[in-house]
Amino acid sequence: MSTLLNTPQNWQQHLAKAFTDITELCQFLNLDPKDLPVSQQAEQKFSLRVPRNYANRIKKNDPKDPLLLQVLPVTHELLTDTHYTSDPVGDINALAAPGIIHKYQGRALLINTGSCAINCRYCFRKEFPYADQHLRRDAQSSALDYLQQQPTISEVILSGGDPLILNDDRLHHLFAALKKITHIKRIRIHSRIPIVLPERITPELISLLNQTDKKIIIVLHCNHPNEIDNTVKAVTKQFIQNEYTVLNQSVLLKNINDSVETLQQLSETLFDAQIQPYYLHLLDKVTGTQHFNVQKEDAIRLVNTLRNTLPGYLVPQLVQEQAGKPAKTVINLQSTRQFE
Ligand code: SF4
């Protein structure tokens, strides 16, 4: 681990060195911003943040690199469309207490922070009012009281933002508090950090996670096979060695992973890295993300073709999150013809 990654105490320094400036990122990638549809206005609305480890996986001299397209602020984000809104999945209506979203039976989601190691341009929570609605340390007790009073909740999902951006001290206090709630059996961690900032997965973090008596499930967010390199494989190997369940959810994104070849390679690469493909989400229609949208019919054709080319356990479930529904909607794959 330490030979592949850097010393455990300095992941924050790696984070601090992330690219936050369009021109600097373009220079690093041998690209001229004048040749790209970059937008400072879009960047001001939702800032650029790209860790160097991730930037190293973007191909230089390639303005269409699928990793670059996920992080570069562009003019398309300024377009408006009434079908694209600030809260497409109904998070605000599902707030049960400050920092808690309770949509689905048996599970509750803790919004621990609004920060992430990377800022994904298609993020469905990019307009979420984190300042008012995340789980601040000084207000944690009301959220924990809510969980304590809901004996049907057996699983807590740590989300955000990215929960692994919290420092070890914050995580330690959170895990210690959750340990006292005996009806919680599982802690699920939704995180893109093992993919974009693997330096964060330190021995100290693993030891902290291992102090819980709950089952740990890590749900990664990886959209393209090029996002997985040896540093990512090293951290997922540690998760497996510590008996965490490791799943992946992807978002289907136009010009990024909307081809059979890319999705097939993504599933194969995930599995090689001991990560189980789990969900393939249709885009959540948040403001300014129209250029990422793949039509549902096209998504169905893609997944139907994947089913013909991969074993069933490598085909992620095609799903859509819809406001007010009691569960994610699994898309019916029978409703269109397969690709020729
Ligand atoms: S890591 Fe997740 S929460 Fe953070 S910007 Fe990307 S999609 Fe949004």
Image (spheres, rainbow, N blue to C red):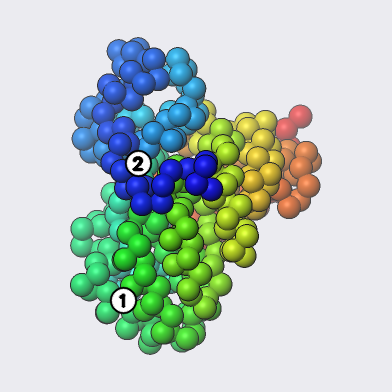
Amino acid, disc 1: Ala
Q: Give the x, y percent position of residue 3.
A: 52, 42
Q: Secondary structure at mark 2?
A: helix
* Quarter of the rendering containing residue 29: top left
Residue 281 in sight from this viewpoint: no
Q: Is residue 301 above or below residue 85?
A: above
Q: Is residue 209 above or below residue 17?
A: below
Relative to the observer, which residue lies in front, 211 or 99? 211
Which residue is located at x 44 percent, y 35 percent? 54
Residue shown at the point (21%, 30%) measured from the top left: 41
Residue at the image position 45 percent from the left and 29 percent from the top: 56
* Residue 14: numbered disc: 2
Q: In the drawing, what numbered circle is on residue 40?
A: none
Q: Where is residue 291? Give x, y as percent.
A: 42, 31
**Badge 1: how crowded within 10 Å, few (<14), some, or many (20+)?**
some
Q: Which residue is mark 1?
A: 143
Label 1 sits on a secondary structure element that is: helix
The crowd level at tag 2 (other Cα within 10 Å; few <14, some 14-19, many 20+) is: some
The residue lying toward the viewer, choosing from 315 and 244, is: 244
Q: Quadrant of the C terminus?
A: top right
Q: Observer-nearest residue: 42 or 190?
A: 190
Q: Nearer the viewer, residue 104 or 206?
A: 206
